[in-house]
């Protein structure tokens, strides 16, 4: 069981490494509006694989996830690593910050209108 899990983890880590190389090539060689879409797609696949690996490792070791940090422990020894999944989420929020801001502004304006309507009904 242990060797199967480790073998699967190494395989998935190799896939992540290839995806990171593809991401670097795509962002380095291309420009335009599709770069963010392709980069986002690749980053989302990496994100899913990253947390799938963490779930597999949690069956073997004690895993604790903190903001931007993962603590792995076994037999009294601990390793602290950066949680790249959270870094990816922050990166995606940065990539799409304008669109996120626009959506939040629309919702905020709709809430303001609803509040004004409610104030008119109450008065």
Image: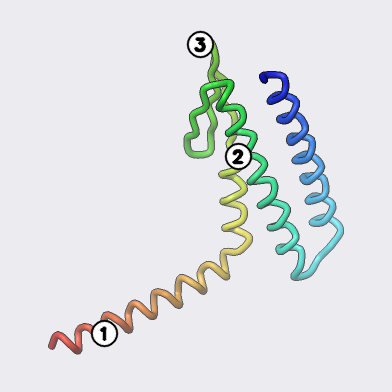
- Of marks 2 and 3, the one in the foreground: 2
Report whether 15 appears left or right of 43: right
Q: Residue at x 76, y 63 (%)?
A: 35
112 or 58: nearer the viewer: 58
Q: Is residue 116 above or below residue 50?
A: below
Q: Is residue 99 above or below residue 49?
A: below
Q: Which residue is mark 1?
A: 116
Quadrant position of residue 95: bottom right
Which comes before the other along the chain, label 3 or label 1? 3
Report whether 34 appears left or right of 52: right
For label 1, the crowd category at 10 Å Cα-Cα, with few meaning under 14, some 14 to 19 and many 20 or more, is few
- Residue 101, horizontal then vertical, whole percent: 51, 69
Q: Which residue is mark 3?
A: 76
Element under disc 1? helix
Which comes before the other along the chain, label 2 or label 3? 2
Q: CA distance from mark 2 to mark 1?
A: 44 Å
Asked whether the residues under the numbered discs 3 and 1 touch, taking CB atoms below 8 Å apart as contact, a structural biologist would say no
31 or 64: nearer the viewer: 64
Q: Residue at x 78, y 46 (%)?
A: 19
Asked whether the residues under the numbered discs 2 and 3 touch, taking CB atoms below 8 Å apart as contact, a structural biologist would say no
49 or 118: nearer the viewer: 49
Element under disc 3? loop
User: What residue occupies the far left of the structure in this picture?
Assistant: 123
Q: CA distance from mark 3 to mark 1?
A: 59 Å
78 or 48: nearer the viewer: 48
Q: Which residue is mark 2?
A: 51
User: What residue occupies the far right of the structure in this picture?
Assistant: 29
For label 3, the crowd category at 10 Å Cα-Cα, with few meaning under 14, some 14 to 19 and many 20 or more, is few
- Image quarter where the N terminus lies is top right
């Amino acid at each position: 069981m242990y060797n199967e899990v480790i073998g699967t983890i190494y395989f998935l880590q190799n896939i992540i490494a290839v995806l990171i190389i593809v991401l670097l090539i795509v962002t380095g060689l291309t420009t335009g509006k599709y770069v963010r879409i392709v980069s986002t797609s690749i980053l989302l696949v990496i994100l899913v694989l990253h947390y799938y690996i963490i779930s597999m490792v949690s069956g073997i070791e004690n895993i604790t996830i903190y903001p931007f940090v993962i603590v792995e422990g076994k037999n009294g020894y601990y390793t602290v690593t950066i949680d790249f999944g959270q870094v990816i989420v922050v990166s995606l929020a940065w990539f799409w910050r304008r669109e996120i801001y626009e959506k939040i502004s629309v919702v905020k304006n709709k809430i303001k209108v609803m509040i004004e309507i409610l104030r008119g009904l109450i008065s």
